[in-house]
Amino acid sequence: MTVGHLMNIGGQMSQTQKRTALRKGREQAQRKGDILRSAREVFFKKGFLSTTMDEIARGCDLAKGTIYLYFKSKEELYISLMVEGLGLLRDDLNTIGVLDLQADQLLGEILGVYFAFYQKNPQYFRIMFLSSQPDVRERVRDELMQECLGRAVECMQVLNEIIEKGTRSGIFRKVDSWSCAIIVWTTINGIITQYEQDPFYRCEILKVNLEEMLRAALELALGGLLINNPSEQGKAKSAS
Amino acid sequence: MTVGHLMNIGGQMSQTQKRTALRKGREQAQRKGDILRSAREVFFKKGFLSTTMDEIARGCDLAKGTIYLYFKSKEELYISLMVEGLGLLRDDLNTIGVLDLQADQLLGEILGVYFAFYQKNPQYFRIMFLSSQPDVRERVRDELMQECLGRAVECMQVLNEIIEKGTRSGIFRKVDSWSCAIIVWTTINGIITQYEQDPFYRCEILKVNLEEMLRAALELALGGLLINNPSEQGKAKSAS
DNA sequence: ATGGCCGATGACCGTCGGTCATTTAATGAA
DNA sequence: TTCATTAAATGACCGACGGTCATCGGCCAT
């Protein structure tokens, strides 16, 4: 079984018992963190298939069996990194909320944050691929997949609010903000993950710049989103 | 080594020799096809990780060793299915070219073909995920990856021509058609592949219809692509 | 001091991708 | 028809890997 599966602090416990239980909890979180760190290093360097559980164990000075006290499978360890990545991205996106800008400019800021995140941690995007494989998901607890979903929704919530703001302030057409947020989120993710397939996009035939591609996609989308006015004319020139 | 690696027909061969060589070639193609068919069935049903080479071998009544005479690795067999899928999609897309429609309508047709293809063979899209893993690509010959790239370019070429047509006929702004084609291709692929991550998009929170999402994305893009004119106003309502 | 409990351990297991010595079949010259 | 030659097919076998579990050892309440 997993570690600490009966760990409920409180109730009829003595003071010392409580203290030990709390310490145990901290130690467990620490172990879990150690394992995740090692997993991140190895997975990021080698990819899912070429990574071995033995190597991860070596990386955090634990026995292989110990890892399985904290994570159900290799896949679950991998997906946990995805949760981690979505959390980091959400935190970055949330720094946008406080800016006092027009909705369309905010979308531009989002793109900047997104692209910066990608440049800092391109590896997190590669993880997203595997989570779509049904046979991978079979080996991950539903609870963990739900956590993924929750984090993704939190990211989209940022987009949702911006689009609502744009609609409210009258510079965007009346669209369903959630649908639109999902489309934008999906499109950005889609472009980046597609781009990650280097041989497709970094070869001499198709050499394209990711940031330019994202900007151009945003311009296209804004073209459809903004209430038309003459000053918008020609904005799409950056797609050239 | 692979089968028939010295297969060059012609030169100083007798008639009978030539005939047998040709037949051998046909038989080899047949075997390769048999293996691919079996691989398709098993991979599509079970996914990459849960599929075993033994099962594929059983499915085409060959010994496991024989498969390795025709494909270098499990990964190469998988990527070969991706090439197959891109070929099918290209063929479907090419049926659009002959239609006599406006560029923006042609883009709508493209979307229809694309969506129909996805509904018919959703599994081919799942394959694309794995091809982006570096450790997978390491186990696939460059030549095969190039074939993938070539097929993808052929698909994008269809988009490219449509956008060029739209620019030429004056209904699209002046954009670089290749950049734009790549963006559209990437976006469509991105949306579909993202959508394939069911738990994200089929859950009650985010339940979205893929076709609507694609249409809405196209409307947004068209909004940015078309030369503004009053009749375009309000087209984005379908995003709601 | 000590008994009991629980997290840590790593030898071990079954499975799988991939190999290669051997078998089988086809071919064409005698 | 026979037989030597060649190449494709075979499947027992190998090493590696994900995952398990009987055992160990240190900590804690008594």
Image: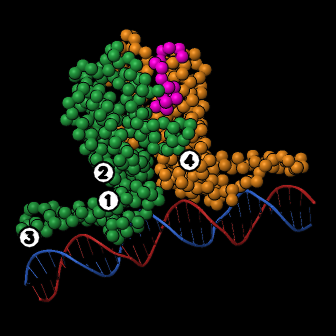
Chain colours: A orange, B green, C blue, D red
Q: Are circles 3 and 1 on residues that touch, CB within 8 Å?
A: no
Chain assignment, label 4? A
Which element is circle 4 on?
helix
Chain assignment, label 1? B
| Mark earlier in primary sequence (1, 2) | 1
Which element is circle 3 on?
helix
Residue B48's quadrant in the figure?
bottom left
Q: CA distance from mark 2 to mark 4?
A: 30 Å
User: On the image, numbered disc 2 is attached to which residue?
Assistant: B84
Which element is circle 1 on?
helix
Whether discs 2 and 4 lie on one chain: the answer is no
Which element is circle 2 on?
helix
Q: Is residue B236 visible?
A: yes
Whether discs 4 and 1 lie on one chain: the answer is no
Q: Position of residue A200 (x, y in %)?
A: 34, 41
Q: Which quadrant holds the C terminus of chain A?
A: top left
For the point 36% across and 66% down, which residue is it?
B59
Numbered badge on residue A79: 4
Numbered badge on residue B36: 1
Q: Are circles 1 and 2 on residues that touch, CB within 8 Å?
A: yes
Q: Nearer the viewer, residue B199 or C29?
A: B199
Q: Are circles 4 and 1 on residues that touch, CB within 8 Å?
A: no
Chain assignment, label 3? B
In the image, is residue B163 above or below residue A47?
above
Q: Is residue B187 magenta?
A: no
User: On the image, numbered disc 3 is attached to which residue?
Assistant: B16
